[in-house]
Image (cartoon, rainbow, N blue to C red):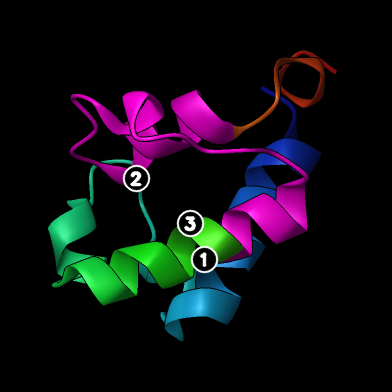
Amino acid sequence: MSIAARDAFRDSLVRSTGAAPASLADDVLIAELAPDSFAMVEILLALQDDLGVVVSARDLDGVRTLGDLRARVVPRDRATH
């Protein structure tokens, strides 16, 4: 994954959650950033808008950490450049 793609993902999370960039490590549990379904929807909408992706419920199966989420939602073409 490119640095630009990783940065875009992190920047989207910073804007949608107000979290400090340094607190957004891959091993952070999503439940820590999105303690309820409303917060999770806010994060997903921001990621969709900022990264130009569509996130379905299927994409979230088994997603527990920010690293899991990034691997599922960062577009493949951005992940390989």
Judged from the image, the secondary structure of the residue bearing numbered disc 2 is helix
What residue sits 55% from the left and 33% below the top? Answer: 73
Q: What is the distance, in whole Å, between disc 1 and disc 3 at their CAs?
A: 9 Å
Q: Nearer the viewer, mark 1 or mark 3?
A: 3
* Label 2 sits on residue: 66
What residue sits 74% from the left and 58% below the top? Answer: 50
Q: Amino acid at mark 1?
A: Leu
Q: Amino acid at mark 3?
A: Leu
Q: Is residue 49 magenta?
A: yes
Q: Which mark is residue 44?
A: 3
* Label 1 sits on residue: 13
Q: Earlier in the sequence, mark 1 or mark 3?
A: 1
Residue 52 in the image: state x and y as whole percent.
Answer: 78, 45
The stretch in magenta equals 46-73
Residue 67 in the image: state x and y as whole percent.
Answer: 37, 35
Marks 2 and 1 in Cβ contact (< 8 Å): yes
Q: Amino acid at mark 2?
A: Leu
Marks 2 and 3 in Cβ contact (< 8 Å): no
- Camera-nearest residue between 55 and 26: 55
